[in-house]
Image (cartoon, rainbow, N blue to C red):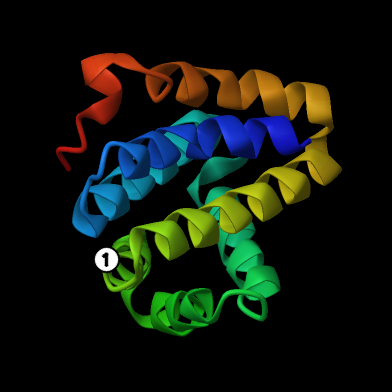
Amino acid sequence: MPGDAQRLNAMLEHLVAQGAGVSSIADAAVAVWRGVEGALSPIIGPSGVAALYRRSLHLTRGTHACLAEVYDADREAGGFVPLHRTLSQQTPAVAVAANGVLLQTFCDLLASLIGATLTERLLRSVQDTHSGGDAALDTTP
């Protein structure tokens, strides 16, 4: 299942290669997460997406200290505000790596619940939206 998360995180890697600042990387990461939320909410509901996201944070917080901060802050703020704030405080490489691990864990959890094929189909629209071109680089909230 590594393909889904890698494809979703590819835009961030592209931004790093172009020399983008960490704020742009954090914006792009949140845009991807909002896309994931938008694609999955009609299927598993907003609370289902939130639960998978929260579980992913729980599972990854030990390997990336910055994600522990997001996990702790997520209880109060909710949404992707804590993720954006935390990624904005990292180096670009750390922000991309942490987001990649979080995405991978999320995709793995989702696949364990609904299967790899359905996970890929559901996330394809997010991947297409964030796979290239100027539209993919638009991180306007």
User: Which residue position is annotated with label 1?
Assistant: 88
Q: Is residue 65 shown above or below 52? A: below
At 49% from the left edge and 34% from the top edge, which residue is drawn?
Answer: 10
Horizontal placement of 42 versus 56: left or right?
A: left
Q: Return the x and y of residue 11 as percentages of the image width and height.
A: 40, 33
- Residue placed farthest to the left in the image? 140
Horizontal placement of 122 versus 35: left or right?
A: right
Amino acid bearing label 1: Ser
Horizontal placement of 3 versus 39: left or right?
A: right
Which SS class for mark 1?
A: helix
| Quadrant for the N terminus in the image | top right
At 82% from the left edge and 43% from the top edge, which residue is drawn?
Answer: 113
Q: Is residue 64 shown above or below 35? A: below
Q: Return the x and y of residue 25 as percentages of the image width and height.
A: 30, 49
At 34% from the left edge and 66% from the top edge, which residue is drawn?
Answer: 91
From the viewer's side, name the closer residue of 73 and 22. Answer: 22
Residue 131 picture quarter: top left
Q: Return the x and y of residue 75 as percentages of the image width and height.
A: 44, 80
Q: Is residue 76 shown above or below 129? A: below
Q: Return the x and y of residue 54 as percentages of the image width and height.
A: 57, 66
From the viewer's side, name the closer residue of 93 and 132. Answer: 93
At 39% from the left edge and 81% from the top edge, which residue is drawn?
Answer: 73
